[in-house]
Image (spheres, grey):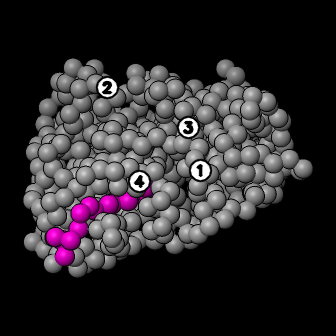
Amino acid sequence: MKKLFLFVNLLTLVSSGGKSQSKLSLSKQEMYADFDSLVSSIRHNSPHLYIKKDLWNYDALAALNTQRKCIDTISSDFSYFLLLRRVFNLTLDMHTSILGGEDWSNTMLNEYNRVRSAFKFSLGNVYVDGKYRISNPVACGKDTIPMWAVITHIHGIPVNEYVKRNLGSRYGYAYDGVNKNFYFTGFFKDDNSIFMDSLRFVVEQDGKQRKYSFSAKNFTQFLPSKSTNKSDTARIAFWQPEQILYIRVPAMDANKIKFFSEGIRSYRDKAVDIKKVILDFRGNPGGEDTVWMSMFSELIPGNIRFQLKLDNRDSGSINKRILADHGMPQKPVRPETNPVLRNYGFNVIVENTDSLPVSATSIKFTGKIYVIYEDNYSAASSSLTIVNASMEDNLVSIGRPSDYFLGMGLSPIQFVLPNTKLKYRIAPSIDATNVVKLDDILHNRLEIEVPKTMQEAIDRFNYPGELSEKKFLLNYDPVIREILTRK
Protein backbone atom coordinates (compact mmCIF):
# COMPACT_ATOMS: atom_id res chain seq x y z
CA MET A 1 0.00 0.00 0.00
CA LYS A 2 2.92 2.34 0.74
CA LYS A 3 4.15 2.10 -2.88
CA LEU A 4 0.74 3.09 -4.25
CA PHE A 5 0.44 5.95 -1.75
CA LEU A 6 3.78 7.37 -2.86
CA PHE A 7 2.72 7.33 -6.49
CA VAL A 8 -0.69 8.91 -5.73
CA ASN A 9 1.16 11.74 -3.99
CA LEU A 10 3.27 12.23 -7.12
CA LEU A 11 0.15 12.33 -9.33
CA THR A 12 -1.40 14.92 -7.02
CA LEU A 13 1.78 17.02 -7.17
CA VAL A 14 1.83 16.87 -10.98
CA SER A 15 -1.86 17.66 -11.26
CA SER A 16 -1.31 20.86 -9.28
CA GLY A 17 1.50 21.97 -11.60
CA GLY A 18 1.52 24.42 -14.50
CA LYS A 19 -1.12 24.87 -17.20
CA SER A 20 0.31 22.22 -19.49
CA GLN A 21 0.07 19.70 -16.66
CA SER A 22 -3.32 20.63 -15.15
CA LYS A 23 -5.75 20.12 -18.05
CA LEU A 24 -7.89 16.96 -18.12
CA SER A 25 -9.53 16.19 -21.46
CA LEU A 26 -10.24 12.50 -20.84
CA SER A 27 -13.27 11.09 -19.07
CA LYS A 28 -12.89 8.45 -16.36
CA GLN A 29 -14.48 5.97 -18.73
CA GLU A 30 -11.89 6.72 -21.42
CA MET A 31 -9.01 6.44 -18.95
CA TYR A 32 -10.24 3.11 -17.64
CA ALA A 33 -10.75 1.86 -21.21
CA ASP A 34 -7.21 2.74 -22.28
CA PHE A 35 -5.70 1.36 -19.10
CA ASP A 36 -7.59 -1.93 -19.43
CA SER A 37 -6.70 -2.20 -23.11
CA LEU A 38 -3.02 -1.67 -22.32
CA VAL A 39 -2.86 -4.18 -19.47
CA SER A 40 -4.85 -6.75 -21.45
CA SER A 41 -2.51 -6.50 -24.46
CA ILE A 42 0.53 -6.91 -22.20
CA ARG A 43 -1.04 -9.84 -20.35
CA HIS A 44 -1.83 -11.69 -23.59
CA ASN A 45 1.35 -10.92 -25.51
CA SER A 46 4.30 -10.68 -23.11
CA PRO A 47 5.52 -14.14 -22.09
CA HIS A 48 8.27 -12.66 -19.93
CA LEU A 49 5.83 -11.47 -17.27
CA TYR A 50 4.86 -14.97 -16.21
CA ILE A 51 8.42 -16.15 -15.61
CA LYS A 52 9.54 -13.12 -13.60
CA LYS A 53 7.36 -14.15 -10.68
CA ASP A 54 9.32 -17.39 -10.22
CA LEU A 55 12.69 -16.21 -11.48
CA TRP A 56 12.86 -12.78 -9.85
CA ASN A 57 10.16 -13.08 -7.16
CA TYR A 58 8.38 -10.24 -8.96
CA ASP A 59 4.66 -10.48 -9.71
CA ALA A 60 4.45 -8.11 -12.66
CA LEU A 61 0.77 -8.78 -13.36
CA ALA A 62 -0.19 -7.91 -9.79
CA ALA A 63 1.95 -4.75 -10.01
CA LEU A 64 0.16 -3.69 -13.21
CA ASN A 65 -3.34 -4.39 -11.87
CA THR A 66 -2.66 -2.42 -8.68
CA GLN A 67 -2.14 0.75 -10.72
CA ARG A 68 -5.76 0.79 -11.90
CA LYS A 69 -7.05 2.33 -8.67
CA CYS A 70 -4.76 5.33 -9.26
CA ILE A 71 -7.14 6.50 -11.98
CA ASP A 72 -9.53 7.71 -9.28
CA THR A 73 -6.92 10.30 -8.23
CA ILE A 74 -6.11 11.56 -11.74
CA SER A 75 -6.98 15.18 -12.42
CA SER A 76 -4.79 16.00 -15.45
CA ASP A 77 -3.82 14.47 -18.77
CA PHE A 78 -0.16 14.59 -17.77
CA SER A 79 -0.67 12.65 -14.55
CA TYR A 80 -2.57 10.04 -16.56
CA PHE A 81 0.32 9.87 -19.02
CA LEU A 82 2.70 9.26 -16.10
CA LEU A 83 0.44 6.45 -14.93
CA LEU A 84 0.63 4.82 -18.38
CA ARG A 85 4.41 5.23 -18.33
CA ARG A 86 4.46 3.52 -14.97
CA VAL A 87 2.61 0.52 -16.43
CA PHE A 88 5.21 0.14 -19.18
CA ASN A 89 8.07 0.48 -16.71
CA LEU A 90 6.58 -2.12 -14.38
CA THR A 91 6.84 -4.78 -17.09
CA LEU A 92 10.65 -4.54 -16.70
CA ASP A 93 10.96 -5.16 -20.43
CA MET A 94 12.55 -2.46 -22.59
CA HIS A 95 10.84 -3.91 -25.67
CA THR A 96 7.47 -3.14 -24.06
CA SER A 97 7.51 0.62 -24.42
CA ILE A 98 5.89 3.80 -25.73
CA LEU A 99 6.47 4.67 -29.39
CA GLY A 100 4.54 7.93 -29.76
CA GLY A 101 1.14 8.65 -31.24
CA GLU A 102 -1.13 11.46 -32.35
CA ASP A 103 -1.81 14.90 -30.86
CA TRP A 104 -2.51 13.89 -27.26
CA SER A 105 0.42 11.49 -27.07
CA ASN A 106 2.88 13.86 -28.68
CA THR A 107 1.82 16.71 -26.39
CA MET A 108 2.36 14.52 -23.32
CA LEU A 109 5.70 13.22 -24.59
CA ASN A 110 6.90 16.77 -25.26
CA GLU A 111 5.86 17.87 -21.79
CA TYR A 112 7.55 14.87 -20.20
CA ASN A 113 10.78 15.51 -22.12
CA ARG A 114 10.65 19.17 -21.08
CA VAL A 115 10.39 18.26 -17.40
CA ARG A 116 13.03 15.56 -17.66
CA SER A 117 15.53 17.78 -19.49
CA ALA A 118 15.37 20.30 -16.62
CA PHE A 119 16.91 17.65 -14.37
CA LYS A 120 20.68 18.30 -14.62
CA PHE A 121 22.10 16.23 -11.78
CA SER A 122 24.19 13.15 -12.49
CA LEU A 123 26.21 10.75 -10.37
CA GLY A 124 28.78 8.52 -12.02
CA ASN A 125 28.62 5.08 -10.44
CA VAL A 126 28.96 1.37 -11.10
CA TYR A 127 26.94 -1.47 -9.59
CA VAL A 128 29.30 -4.11 -8.19
CA ASP A 129 28.44 -6.97 -5.81
CA GLY A 130 25.11 -5.48 -4.82
CA LYS A 131 26.45 -1.97 -4.14
CA TYR A 132 26.53 1.32 -6.04
CA ARG A 133 30.05 2.71 -6.01
CA ILE A 134 31.20 6.14 -7.16
CA SER A 135 33.15 5.90 -10.43
CA ASN A 136 33.81 9.61 -10.89
CA PRO A 137 34.76 11.75 -7.84
CA VAL A 138 32.24 14.50 -7.05
CA ALA A 139 32.69 17.89 -5.39
CA CYS A 140 29.95 18.83 -2.92
CA GLY A 141 30.66 22.13 -1.18
CA LYS A 142 34.03 21.75 0.51
CA ASP A 143 33.83 17.95 0.43
CA THR A 144 34.82 15.48 -2.23
CA ILE A 145 33.04 12.17 -2.61
CA PRO A 146 35.89 9.87 -3.64
CA MET A 147 35.96 7.10 -6.17
CA TRP A 148 34.62 3.73 -5.00
CA ALA A 149 32.68 5.23 -2.06
CA VAL A 150 29.35 3.42 -1.60
CA ILE A 151 25.99 5.16 -2.11
CA THR A 152 23.94 3.62 0.71
CA HIS A 153 20.75 5.74 0.89
CA ILE A 154 18.64 8.09 -1.22
CA HIS A 155 16.05 10.28 0.55
CA GLY A 156 16.63 8.31 3.74
CA ILE A 157 15.84 4.96 2.10
CA PRO A 158 18.47 2.24 1.44
CA VAL A 159 19.21 2.41 -2.29
CA ASN A 160 18.23 -1.18 -3.10
CA GLU A 161 14.97 -0.72 -1.17
CA TYR A 162 14.30 2.58 -2.97
CA VAL A 163 14.72 0.83 -6.31
CA LYS A 164 12.42 -2.00 -5.26
CA ARG A 165 9.72 0.47 -4.19
CA ASN A 166 10.02 2.50 -7.39
CA LEU A 167 10.37 -0.03 -10.19
CA GLY A 168 7.62 1.74 -12.11
CA SER A 169 9.39 5.09 -12.01
CA ARG A 170 11.90 4.42 -14.79
CA TYR A 171 12.84 1.88 -17.45
CA GLY A 172 16.02 -0.15 -17.67
CA TYR A 173 16.16 -2.05 -14.39
CA ALA A 174 18.02 -5.36 -14.51
CA TYR A 175 18.01 -8.10 -11.87
CA ASP A 176 21.03 -9.26 -9.89
CA GLY A 177 20.21 -12.90 -9.18
CA VAL A 178 23.11 -13.32 -6.76
CA ASN A 179 22.21 -10.43 -4.44
CA LYS A 180 18.48 -10.49 -5.26
CA ASN A 181 18.38 -6.82 -6.25
CA PHE A 182 16.90 -4.89 -9.12
CA TYR A 183 19.48 -2.34 -10.23
CA PHE A 184 20.34 0.42 -12.66
CA THR A 185 23.09 3.01 -12.28
CA GLY A 186 20.64 5.79 -13.23
CA PHE A 187 18.30 4.92 -10.34
CA PHE A 188 18.40 8.52 -9.04
CA LYS A 189 16.83 9.96 -12.21
CA ASP A 190 13.30 8.63 -12.30
CA ASP A 191 9.73 9.86 -12.62
CA ASN A 192 9.80 10.89 -8.95
CA SER A 193 13.07 12.80 -8.81
CA ILE A 194 12.59 14.81 -12.03
CA PHE A 195 9.90 16.77 -10.18
CA MET A 196 12.13 17.46 -7.17
CA ASP A 197 14.37 20.44 -6.48
CA SER A 198 17.02 18.48 -4.61
CA LEU A 199 18.22 14.95 -3.92
CA ARG A 200 19.60 13.61 -0.64
CA PHE A 201 22.15 10.82 -0.40
CA VAL A 202 24.12 8.99 2.25
CA VAL A 203 27.58 7.88 1.10
CA GLU A 204 29.89 5.53 2.99
CA GLN A 205 33.68 5.51 2.87
CA ASP A 206 36.02 3.61 5.17
CA GLY A 207 33.11 2.61 7.39
CA LYS A 208 31.95 6.22 7.90
CA GLN A 209 28.73 7.65 6.50
CA ARG A 210 28.21 11.23 5.30
CA LYS A 211 25.01 12.95 4.20
CA TYR A 212 24.93 15.03 1.01
CA SER A 213 22.31 17.14 -0.72
CA PHE A 214 22.46 18.10 -4.40
CA SER A 215 20.38 20.44 -6.53
CA ALA A 216 18.46 18.53 -9.20
CA LYS A 217 18.52 21.56 -11.50
CA ASN A 218 22.29 22.12 -11.57
CA PHE A 219 25.00 20.11 -13.25
CA THR A 220 27.14 17.96 -10.96
CA GLN A 221 30.65 19.22 -10.20
CA PHE A 222 32.78 16.24 -11.14
CA LEU A 223 36.49 16.28 -10.53
CA PRO A 224 38.19 16.52 -13.92
CA SER A 225 39.36 13.21 -15.36
CA LYS A 226 42.58 12.91 -17.30
CA SER A 227 40.95 10.57 -19.82
CA THR A 228 38.63 11.22 -22.75
CA ASN A 229 36.26 8.94 -24.64
CA LYS A 230 35.40 10.89 -27.76
CA SER A 231 36.65 8.49 -30.42
CA ASP A 232 34.61 5.40 -29.58
CA THR A 233 33.33 4.87 -33.11
CA ALA A 234 32.91 1.86 -35.39
CA ARG A 235 36.40 0.85 -36.43
CA ILE A 236 38.69 -1.99 -37.49
CA ALA A 237 42.37 -2.10 -36.59
CA PHE A 238 45.15 -4.66 -36.88
CA TRP A 239 47.32 -4.48 -33.80
CA GLN A 240 51.00 -5.19 -34.28
CA PRO A 241 53.07 -6.87 -32.95
CA GLU A 242 50.18 -8.59 -31.09
CA GLN A 243 48.71 -9.80 -34.40
CA ILE A 244 45.16 -9.07 -33.20
CA LEU A 245 42.34 -7.92 -35.47
CA TYR A 246 40.28 -5.60 -33.28
CA ILE A 247 36.75 -4.66 -34.37
CA ARG A 248 34.75 -2.16 -32.34
CA VAL A 249 30.96 -2.26 -32.79
CA PRO A 250 29.24 0.42 -30.64
CA ALA A 251 25.81 -0.20 -32.23
CA MET A 252 24.19 -2.70 -34.59
CA ASP A 253 23.78 -0.02 -37.23
CA ALA A 254 22.67 -1.48 -40.57
CA ASN A 255 24.37 1.43 -42.34
CA LYS A 256 27.70 0.02 -41.14
CA ILE A 257 27.31 -3.45 -42.68
CA LYS A 258 29.25 -2.49 -45.78
CA PHE A 259 31.97 -0.85 -43.68
CA PHE A 260 32.49 -3.92 -41.52
CA SER A 261 32.16 -6.47 -44.33
CA GLU A 262 34.61 -4.73 -46.63
CA GLY A 263 36.97 -4.00 -43.76
CA ILE A 264 37.10 -7.65 -42.70
CA ARG A 265 37.46 -8.89 -46.29
CA SER A 266 40.47 -6.63 -46.76
CA TYR A 267 42.36 -9.04 -44.46
CA ARG A 268 41.50 -12.12 -46.50
CA ASP A 269 45.01 -12.49 -47.91
CA LYS A 270 46.54 -11.67 -44.52
CA ALA A 271 44.48 -14.04 -42.37
CA VAL A 272 47.52 -16.22 -41.79
CA ASP A 273 49.13 -13.28 -39.95
CA ILE A 274 46.22 -12.92 -37.53
CA LYS A 275 46.48 -14.77 -34.22
CA LYS A 276 43.24 -13.56 -32.59
CA VAL A 277 40.13 -11.61 -33.53
CA ILE A 278 38.31 -9.40 -31.02
CA LEU A 279 34.75 -8.21 -31.62
CA ASP A 280 34.00 -5.56 -28.99
CA PHE A 281 30.22 -5.30 -28.44
CA ARG A 282 30.38 -3.57 -25.04
CA GLY A 283 27.70 -0.95 -24.46
CA ASN A 284 26.01 -1.89 -27.73
CA PRO A 285 22.25 -1.29 -27.23
CA GLY A 286 21.16 -3.26 -30.30
CA GLY A 287 19.74 -2.42 -33.69
CA GLU A 288 19.73 -4.91 -36.58
CA ASP A 289 20.73 -8.58 -36.25
CA THR A 290 22.02 -8.47 -39.81
CA VAL A 291 25.03 -6.43 -38.63
CA TRP A 292 26.57 -9.10 -36.41
CA MET A 293 25.40 -11.87 -38.72
CA SER A 294 27.27 -10.35 -41.66
CA MET A 295 30.41 -9.86 -39.57
CA PHE A 296 30.39 -13.44 -38.30
CA SER A 297 29.85 -14.70 -41.85
CA GLU A 298 32.92 -12.79 -43.05
CA LEU A 299 35.09 -14.27 -40.28
CA ILE A 300 34.11 -17.90 -39.66
CA PRO A 301 35.70 -20.85 -41.48
CA GLY A 302 32.43 -22.74 -41.93
CA ASN A 303 28.68 -22.68 -41.29
CA ILE A 304 27.52 -22.56 -37.67
CA ARG A 305 24.49 -24.71 -36.88
CA PHE A 306 22.35 -23.82 -33.89
CA GLN A 307 19.09 -24.82 -32.26
CA LEU A 308 16.27 -22.29 -31.98
CA LYS A 309 13.00 -22.55 -30.09
CA LEU A 310 10.71 -19.56 -29.55
CA ASP A 311 7.63 -19.54 -27.33
CA ASN A 312 4.74 -17.11 -26.97
CA ARG A 313 1.48 -16.75 -25.08
CA ASP A 314 -1.09 -15.82 -27.74
CA SER A 315 -0.13 -16.58 -31.34
CA GLY A 316 -3.45 -15.24 -32.59
CA SER A 317 -2.37 -11.72 -31.69
CA ILE A 318 0.81 -11.79 -33.79
CA ASN A 319 0.34 -10.16 -37.15
CA LYS A 320 0.57 -12.82 -39.88
CA ARG A 321 2.80 -10.58 -41.96
CA ILE A 322 5.30 -10.46 -39.10
CA LEU A 323 5.30 -14.24 -38.96
CA ALA A 324 5.74 -14.48 -42.72
CA ASP A 325 8.59 -11.96 -42.69
CA HIS A 326 10.38 -14.17 -40.17
CA GLY A 327 9.60 -17.37 -42.07
CA MET A 328 7.49 -18.50 -39.14
CA PRO A 329 4.42 -20.79 -39.19
CA GLN A 330 0.99 -19.12 -39.02
CA LYS A 331 0.01 -21.13 -35.96
CA PRO A 332 1.81 -22.72 -32.99
CA VAL A 333 3.90 -25.81 -33.60
CA ARG A 334 2.63 -27.31 -30.33
CA PRO A 335 2.07 -26.49 -26.65
CA GLU A 336 5.26 -26.10 -24.61
CA THR A 337 6.06 -29.42 -22.89
CA ASN A 338 9.44 -28.62 -21.32
CA PRO A 339 8.96 -29.46 -17.61
CA VAL A 340 10.59 -26.14 -16.68
CA LEU A 341 8.22 -24.07 -18.86
CA ARG A 342 5.02 -26.04 -19.41
CA ASN A 343 3.10 -24.41 -16.54
CA TYR A 344 3.30 -20.90 -18.02
CA GLY A 345 0.77 -21.45 -20.81
CA PHE A 346 3.37 -21.08 -23.54
CA ASN A 347 3.08 -22.27 -27.12
CA VAL A 348 6.06 -23.26 -29.23
CA ILE A 349 5.97 -21.14 -32.38
CA VAL A 350 9.43 -21.94 -33.75
CA GLU A 351 11.43 -25.12 -33.28
CA ASN A 352 14.18 -25.98 -35.69
CA THR A 353 17.87 -26.24 -36.40
CA ASP A 354 19.13 -23.21 -38.25
CA SER A 355 22.46 -22.27 -39.74
CA LEU A 356 24.55 -19.13 -39.99
CA PRO A 357 26.28 -19.54 -43.37
CA VAL A 358 29.87 -18.64 -44.05
CA SER A 359 30.25 -15.93 -46.68
CA ALA A 360 31.88 -16.73 -50.00
CA THR A 361 34.28 -13.88 -49.25
CA SER A 362 35.01 -14.92 -45.64
CA ILE A 363 38.60 -14.73 -44.42
CA LYS A 364 37.85 -18.18 -42.88
CA PHE A 365 39.75 -17.44 -39.72
CA THR A 366 40.39 -20.62 -37.70
CA GLY A 367 41.85 -19.05 -34.57
CA LYS A 368 39.85 -17.79 -31.61
CA ILE A 369 37.28 -15.06 -32.22
CA TYR A 370 36.60 -13.37 -28.87
CA VAL A 371 33.27 -11.51 -28.64
CA ILE A 372 33.19 -9.08 -25.71
CA TYR A 373 29.84 -8.44 -24.00
CA GLU A 374 28.80 -5.96 -21.29
CA ASP A 375 25.72 -3.74 -20.92
CA ASN A 376 24.07 -5.22 -24.01
CA TYR A 377 20.47 -5.62 -25.07
CA SER A 378 18.33 -6.56 -28.05
CA ALA A 379 20.23 -7.33 -31.29
CA ALA A 380 23.62 -6.97 -29.59
CA SER A 381 22.83 -9.75 -27.15
CA SER A 382 21.00 -12.03 -29.58
CA SER A 383 24.39 -12.71 -31.16
CA LEU A 384 25.30 -14.53 -27.94
CA THR A 385 22.97 -17.35 -29.06
CA ILE A 386 25.30 -18.06 -31.97
CA VAL A 387 28.53 -17.52 -30.05
CA ASN A 388 27.43 -20.01 -27.39
CA ALA A 389 25.80 -22.42 -29.84
CA SER A 390 28.72 -24.83 -29.71
CA MET A 391 31.78 -25.23 -27.53
CA GLU A 392 33.53 -26.75 -30.54
CA ASP A 393 33.55 -23.66 -32.78
CA ASN A 394 36.07 -20.83 -32.59
CA LEU A 395 33.68 -18.17 -31.24
CA VAL A 396 34.24 -17.36 -27.54
CA SER A 397 32.02 -15.12 -25.38
CA ILE A 398 33.81 -13.05 -22.75
CA GLY A 399 33.11 -10.05 -20.52
CA ARG A 400 30.27 -9.32 -18.08
CA PRO A 401 26.74 -10.73 -18.42
CA SER A 402 23.79 -8.39 -18.89
CA ASP A 403 21.05 -9.22 -16.38
CA TYR A 404 18.07 -8.96 -18.74
CA PHE A 405 16.02 -11.42 -20.75
CA LEU A 406 18.21 -11.85 -23.83
CA GLY A 407 18.26 -14.38 -26.66
CA MET A 408 16.55 -14.31 -30.04
CA GLY A 409 12.94 -13.40 -30.74
CA LEU A 410 10.34 -11.89 -33.02
CA SER A 411 10.19 -8.17 -33.62
CA PRO A 412 7.88 -6.34 -31.19
CA ILE A 413 4.22 -5.94 -32.17
CA GLN A 414 2.79 -2.43 -32.36
CA PHE A 415 -0.50 -1.42 -30.71
CA VAL A 416 -2.60 1.75 -30.34
CA LEU A 417 -4.76 2.68 -27.36
CA PRO A 418 -8.39 3.45 -28.33
CA ASN A 419 -8.82 6.93 -26.80
CA THR A 420 -5.43 8.57 -26.29
CA LYS A 421 -4.15 6.96 -29.54
CA LEU A 422 -0.88 6.25 -27.75
CA LYS A 423 1.28 3.91 -29.84
CA TYR A 424 3.33 1.26 -28.11
CA ARG A 425 5.06 -2.06 -28.68
CA ILE A 426 5.28 -5.44 -26.95
CA ALA A 427 7.84 -8.22 -27.45
CA PRO A 428 5.63 -11.27 -28.20
CA SER A 429 8.12 -14.12 -27.95
CA ILE A 430 10.71 -15.57 -25.61
CA ASP A 431 13.77 -17.66 -26.45
CA ALA A 432 13.13 -21.11 -24.96
CA THR A 433 16.14 -22.81 -26.57
CA ASN A 434 18.04 -25.30 -24.41
CA VAL A 435 16.30 -24.32 -21.18
CA VAL A 436 17.19 -26.87 -18.49
CA LYS A 437 16.94 -24.57 -15.45
CA LEU A 438 14.63 -21.58 -15.28
CA ASP A 439 17.46 -19.04 -15.33
CA ASP A 440 18.61 -20.49 -18.66
CA ILE A 441 15.74 -18.47 -20.15
CA LEU A 442 17.87 -15.32 -19.70
CA HIS A 443 20.47 -16.53 -22.23
CA ASN A 444 23.10 -14.29 -20.66
CA ARG A 445 25.85 -16.71 -19.66
CA LEU A 446 29.35 -16.08 -20.95
CA GLU A 447 32.11 -18.63 -21.44
CA ILE A 448 34.61 -16.35 -19.70
CA GLU A 449 33.52 -13.82 -17.08
CA VAL A 450 35.84 -11.00 -16.02
CA PRO A 451 34.86 -9.33 -12.71
CA LYS A 452 34.79 -5.58 -12.21
CA THR A 453 37.37 -4.13 -9.84
CA MET A 454 38.12 -0.80 -8.21
CA GLN A 455 41.39 -0.62 -10.11
CA GLU A 456 39.53 -0.63 -13.41
CA ALA A 457 37.61 2.52 -12.47
CA ILE A 458 40.79 4.20 -11.19
CA ASP A 459 42.65 3.42 -14.41
CA ARG A 460 39.84 4.80 -16.56
CA PHE A 461 39.76 8.00 -14.55
CA ASN A 462 43.51 8.59 -14.43
CA TYR A 463 44.56 7.50 -17.92
CA PRO A 464 46.02 10.55 -19.73
CA GLY A 465 44.48 9.92 -23.11
CA GLU A 466 41.69 8.39 -25.17
CA LEU A 467 40.06 5.33 -23.57
CA SER A 468 39.40 3.76 -26.95
CA GLU A 469 43.03 3.81 -28.08
CA LYS A 470 45.14 0.69 -28.38
CA LYS A 471 47.57 1.66 -25.62
CA PHE A 472 44.85 1.89 -23.00
CA LEU A 473 43.04 -1.25 -24.12
CA LEU A 474 46.19 -3.38 -24.08
CA ASN A 475 47.55 -2.08 -20.81
CA TYR A 476 44.52 -1.27 -18.65
CA ASP A 477 41.38 -2.90 -20.05
CA PRO A 478 40.87 -6.05 -17.91
CA VAL A 479 38.86 -7.92 -20.55
CA ILE A 480 41.38 -7.27 -23.31
CA ARG A 481 44.19 -8.22 -20.95
CA GLU A 482 42.40 -11.48 -20.13
CA ILE A 483 42.23 -12.25 -23.86
CA LEU A 484 45.97 -11.60 -24.17
CA THR A 485 46.62 -14.39 -21.66
CA ARG A 486 44.64 -16.90 -23.72
CA LYS A 487 46.23 -19.02 -26.42
Q: Nearer the viewer, mark 4 or mark 2?
A: 4
Residue range in magenta is: 270-285
Q: Which residue is mark 4?
A: 481
Between tags 4 and 3, which lies in front?
A: 4
| Relative to 437, 156 lies left or right | right
Q: Is residue 272 left or right of residue 126?
A: left
Which x, y percent locates residue 237?
35, 73
Q: For the residues marked 4 and 3, what is the alpha-carbon distance in whole angstroms? A: 20 Å
Taking 295 as reference, is 133 above or below it? above
Q: Give the number of the disc on residue 457.
A: 1
Between residues 181 and 458, which one lies in front from this camera angle? 458
The reply to whether the C-beta atoms of the residues labelled 2 and 3 are less than 8 Å apart is no
Quarter of the image where the N terminus is located: top right
Residue at 50% x, 63% y is 472
- Tell which of 222 and 487 is nearer to you: 487
**What type is the residue that disc 3 sits on?**
Val
Q: CA distance from mark 3 to mark 1?
A: 11 Å
**Mark 2 — residue?**
438
Classify mark 4: helix, strand or loop. Answer: helix
Q: Residue at x 29, y 68 (%)?
A: 243
- Give the mark, 4 or 3, whose residue is nearer the N terminus: 3
Q: What residue is drawn where x is 70% and y is 28%? A: 158
Q: Secondary structure at mark 3?
A: strand
Residue 65 seen in the current view: no
Identify the mark at residue 128; answer none if there is no mark.
3
**Element class at badge 2:** helix
